[in-house]
Amino acid sequence: MQIVHRAMGFWKRRPRPRYALALAGGGVIGGMYEVGAMTALEERLNGSGSGFDVYVGCSAGSVVAALLASGIRAGEIYHVLEEDLDDPLNMRRGVLFANDAFRLACTRFGRFMWAIGKQVLRGDRCLPDVLARAERELPAGFFTLAALERFVRLGLGSRGHSNSFLDLPRKLLIPAVDLNTAERVVFGAGELASVPISEAVAASSAIPGFFDPYTIDGQDYVDGGTGFCGHADLAAEAGADVVFVINPLVPNRMADGGASMRTRGVYTIMEQASRIYSQNLLQLGLAGLAVKFPRTAFYLLQPPRNTTLLFGPSMGFEASRAALRFGYESTKAWLGEQGAPLVRSLAPEAAAI
């Protein structure tokens, strides 16, 4: 009898590992790259095992994570974007910038210049002091997130999906930062699970200075990438055994003899500095998580540093379709090489193909 029990215990099916997907931010370019990458993963697995148990999305990654966690396939989103279809899931300029966005931004910029000009006319010539004295007259941002919130809400609705975390078939976590307490908050968990998904996405995407902080129930929130990158710890803490992290934006490494980035102006310098900062945060964070969660496997997908294709303005649309295709093609190659262990983990039968 003991032999029978031992045999039954041996053949008893082991619990299925829990898989998590963590999508970092990266603006329009980053979101497109992530859609392309996830489409390649879906195809590689032939649809098998591509459904993650936990989705974590920050900033632009929160848009993609929200759609995927609701059950919308990455391949469907890719088709809409690649063919530029007239579809609620098409991330066109109107998704981020409403028709009157440029007028509003110009008005706010004028307010910005007037606030500074008044201090200069009063005889103050020290710029830091001018900014300090004019702070209450400066705008909180140059654009609003109303258009993005609407895109997510209508996009989910167009496929018959709910805008509520509570109705999702899978766990979705969207981090943001409380502007006034400087603390990370996680929408989709605890009391914040009652916040609509579209509003959580808007809060997580509020890039400081570019967008207004997003207000929910009287609290102001800014981009979830402020002081964080990837938020893979949320996936591990949710019990994931395997965490797949996608980081679309890395610092660019100029070729020897190439012109310095300095020649491309202040925006390029700020973009490079931001990428250096977030890249270091991610690397340090993943190193710490490997120690804290030794039984959890972490896989990181990100472009090579010399990929100039993804080094344009992250909030621009000109290279968005190219980023979409690059995310697909580069991930397809990665899955056959460095990402092969991830494929074997997600769907062993697909790894043999």
Image (cartoon, rainbow, N blue to C red):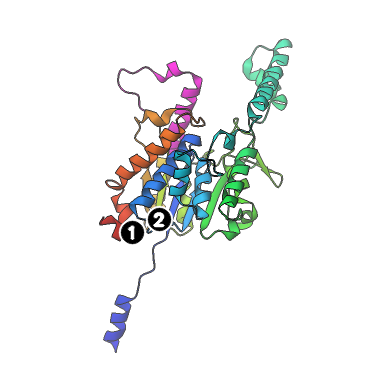
- Of callouts 2 and 1, the N-terminal one: 2
Where disc 1 sits, the SS reads loop
Q: Is residue 101 above or below residue 344?
A: above
Dot 2 crowding, Cα within 10 Å, few <14, some 14–19, many 20+? many
Please provide percent x and percent y for residue 129. 66, 19
**Amino acid type at image mark 2:** Ser
Measured in 3D between alpha carbons, the distance from the residue under mark 2 to the one under mark 1, in whole angstroms, is 8 Å
What's the residue at 28%, 81% (across, down)?
A: 7
Farthest residue, direction bottom: 1
| Residue denoted by label 2 | 50
Query: Is 40 placed above or below 51 here?
Result: above
| Image-based side of 62 in relation to 308, left or right | right
| Rendered residue at 60%/30% (across/down) | 209
Is the magenta region chiefly helix, strand or loop? helix
Residue 120 in the image, given as x and y percentages of width and height: 69, 12
Q: Where is residue 343 in the image (x, y as percent from the top left)?
A: 32, 54
Query: Which segment did they paint magenta?
Result: 252-281
Quick check: is 202 in the magenta stretch? no
For the residues bearing labels 2 and 1, Cβ distance under 8 angstroms: yes
Question: Compared to 336, does 107 lie above or below?
Answer: above
What SS does tag 2 mark? loop
- Asked if residue 262 lies in the magenta stretch, the reply is yes
Q: In this view, does 125 lie above or below 176?
A: above
Instruction: Name the residue beneath numbered marker 1.
Output: 347
- As shown in the figure, which amino acid type bears the numbered disc 1? Ala
Image quarter where the C terminus lies is bottom left
